[in-house]
Amino acid sequence: MRSTGIRRTCVTLMACSMALTACGSGDDEAADGKTRITVNCMPPKSAKVDRSFFEADIRAFEKRNPDIDVVPHDAFPCQDPKTFDAKLAGGQMEDVFYTYFTDARHVADINQAADITRYVKDLKSYDTIQRQLRDIYTVDGRIYGIPRTGYSMGLIYNRKLFERAGLDPDRPPATWDELRDAAKKIAGLGNGTVGYADYSAQNQGGWHFTAELYSQGGDVVSEDGKKATIDTPEGKAVLHNLKDMRWTDNSMGSKQLLVINDVQQMMGSGKLGMYLSAPDNIPILVKEKGGNYEDLALAPMPGGRGTLIGGDGYMFNKKATPEQIKAGLKWLDHMFLTPGDGFLGDYARARKNDAPVGLPEPRLFSGAADAKDQQVKKANANVPVDNYQAFLDGNQDLEMKIEPPRAQQIYSVLDSAVSSVLTRKDADIDQLLSDASGKIDAILARG
């Protein structure tokens, strides 16, 4: 699942625009002898600032590399699940194309991406990227893509409501029991205030069930990817907790079957105490939903065991020539993989254009590269970074786990379990998990 509104830039970016030029044609030589590459995920014209950044960065890259011609494509969204596989099968992807983390293995398994293992040595930034993110694009020891951003789930909460409810905003809940207690106190403020909200429709309930299960130390599927592992004490704990907060504590409000926009509206209006999300929600809450940076804080996932991570990256069309792959890697280095610079990392430029700087993610790099990136970010911060320190500190102790295989199909099944406990007081948790397990086993059996 995507995170939400993703980061500072318009990372709900774009897929292939067929009207511009053929995608991934393998025709690597422009009329003037340059190596031409098509790339996607250029921000739309409606995102004027982000688009101007993207175009300026391409111009700077071409000036530095006069032998390369970059042809960007924009459309909306960046990767449409309804058309992604069809474009792969039809050979219509760009030479360098965007993917979610969850698609990396699938694209490699169906032989629709170039093996770039022998070219990665020329990508100067590769070894600075966090290994767990690099591994997502490594299949059977071969490298098929380059991560661009990463996120992890945490707990967004309203500091002002914490204070009004007699809670310490500098000590957010670290366990689900503590979260349940805090939610009751916040809901007790009355006047339509909700202590904790969760998604339960459009596959988003299944997504959050997965994150909550990870936080308890559980998993959705077995290590070999063949069986569901949700009908467990950890899975039952997730649903029992939601059911108890909804029906015993009345801390989740009466309106259910919520999706992300509903919950963001609640938080932005100051009527919600807590919900699970990645850091990229915070600018949306402020710029689109009426929230205030000073009131919004971020904590690690309650439970202390694990959290769900996601993100995106780029893969290469299997028809791309060696020259195009090399050119594409240079472009990725320039645009996204230089600490403190480029489309995502030029924090000084972002601050100058009133974009939020100082959010704790995306955090792509490791070691000295990460230190440099964080130093530049801190120097240009224009949001209250202390509000996110608990998230940064707590994440150090959590296991970072990617979404399960066949994620969207599995989330659709889990949606039903989550929505049932939130809309039916008599929901049978054991039966819900047993039924969901059987359906997930069938999904996994189809491969």
Image (tube, helix red, strand yellow):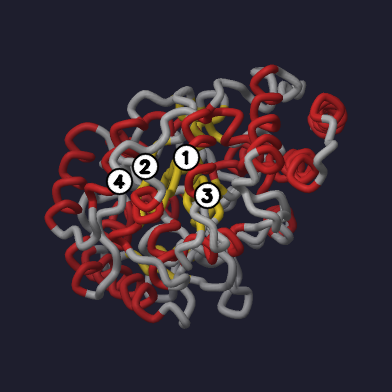
Numbered badge on residue 273: none
Which label's residue is closer to the chain start, 1 or 4? Answer: 1
Identify the residue at image location x=67%, y=27%. Answer: 220
x, y percent for residue 388: 30, 46
Residue tagged 2: 167
**Mark 4 element type:** helix
Position of residue 256 relative to residue 132, above or below, is below
Mark 1 Cα-neighbour bin, 10 Å: few <14, some 14–19, many ≥20: many
| Marks 1/4: CA–CA distance | 19 Å
Q: Are marks 4 and 3 in contact (CB under 8 Å)?
A: no
What residue type is disc 4 on? Tyr
Residue 21 visible here: yes
What residue type is disc 2 on? Leu
**Mark 2 element type:** loop
Which quarter of the rendered picture does the C terminus lie within? Answer: top right
Identify the residue at image location x=57%, y=62%. Answer: 192
Residue 344 as seen in the image, left or right of residue 220 = left
Numbered badge on residue 182: 1
Residue tagged 4: 388
Which label's residue is closer to the chain start, 3 or 2? Answer: 2
